[in-house]
Amino acid sequence: MTAKALVLIGSPRASKSTSHALGAYLEERLAEKGMEFDEAYAKKALASEAGWAELAGKMKAADLIVLSTPLYVDSFPAPVMAIYERTWKEGVPLRGKGFAVIMNSGFPEAFHMNTGLKIAEHFARKVGMDWLGGLAMGSGAAIDGQPLGQAGARSRHAVKGLDMAADFLAGLKPIPAEAKAEFAKPVMPRGFMVWASNRTFRRAHKKAGKGGLRDRPYQ
Amino acid sequence: MRALILDGTVGEGSFDRSVGMLAAELLKGAGWEVDHLLLSEMSIAPCTGCFNCWIRTPGECSQQDEAEKVVRAMAKASLWVYVTPVIFGGFSYQLKKGLDRLIPILLPEFKVFANETHHPLRYHEGFDVLGIGINEAEDAEWNATFKTLVKRNALNAHSKHNGAIVVERGRSFEEVRSSLSACLKEAGLS
């Protein structure tokens, strides 16, 4: 029987997000290895009871669930925490399924996501899933929601890391340390990333923003 | 000295809710003015990740809901107190939906502090952070992750003083009061 993967996108930006770009690339690699895949969005799943039932059904049908999500305040976006809580409290049967996480953030360093990945591991163990590990990358803005094939050299470490991880995830095996290290490699030196990001924000504000970038409306 | 309690517990009269009330009482006793927001009773939508609060309307969120009250109160306080059940070592959805909307408190720019990149703050130089978790029973791994998460939040808030404690459900109020009081002292907040 063909193994099934579900890629769950945690970003509220849904299909326009870097989380989706990373998840979609992994879907292609898993499909090449003979897996069927399905996709779901956290925001849509929580918008209605029908959305929740659909997500629960997709999770039950999957052998492997991969959450691709941004970092929000050192952890997961609130809707992802809601899915963790609800899955656990309602006893959605997930025992024995594989669970892996792909996290990205705007910070240049990948270590900001360590705590989030630990929370994901605790969740997996509590609901009886096999924790297959997490991939974390900084400077997610360098991909900015573009398909990885169009992001050029800025996605080279993400591509290589996901290629390496897919070999293992397709067999429901843990992501090796080499894949995690490759995925986490910075695409540019931190100092340059900080400078480029700050310049991008200043320019974007100059073009479309009101008032000053450092205004304090609630003081 | 103004403290803001971001209360991510649910259930009026529940043990969890009473921990938040106890924290408010202790803080007032230590000389803090206290704002206490019960997030489960507020209409707050999840952050959409649009970053308009950084670019188009600096410091103000585009979504019109009660998160504005949270952001205003956060800007005015010098201490943020989180009260939450410990969920897999993290915060409850109710707390997280409020916390995720704090982006207007931060500036969009990056700056390296102590060899880590963080955002400078739009208000103040730093906010102190106290995390009060509530758990079913002693769970060392979840509790350790919770404390690490509070510590990471405190780094992003550029805290001078911070602390975290996990209260076990079923303890007597006197035990909880004593633990919270010791935690406040240890963190330099009373």
Image: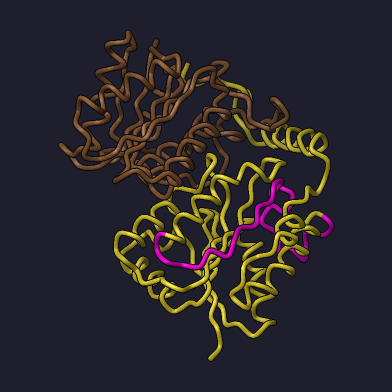
Chain colours: A yellow, B brown
Magenta stretch holds residue A146: yes
x and y percentages locating residue B133 in the rendered image: 36, 36
x and y percentages locating residue A101 in the rendered image: 57, 60
Magenta stretch holds residue A64: no
Q: Residue at x 58, y 21 (%)?
A: A215
Q: Is residue B26 above or below residue A55?
A: above
Q: Is residue B138 above or below residue A201?
A: below
Depth check: B105 or A132 in front? A132
* Residue at the extreme left: B13
Depth check: B35 or B116 in front? B116
x and y percentages locating residue B103 in the rendered image: 53, 34
Q: Is residue B109 above or below residue A51?
A: above
Depth check: B123 or B159 in front? B159
User: Image check: A125 left or right of B4?
Assistant: right
Q: How many marks?
A: 0
User: Image check: A199 left or right of A88?
Assistant: right
User: Image check: A69 left or right of B25?
Assistant: right
Which image quarter: residue B57?
top right
Q: Which residues are magenta?
A: A126-153
Q: Residue at x 40, y 38 (%)?
A: B98
Q: Residue at x 46, y 67 (%)?
A: A129
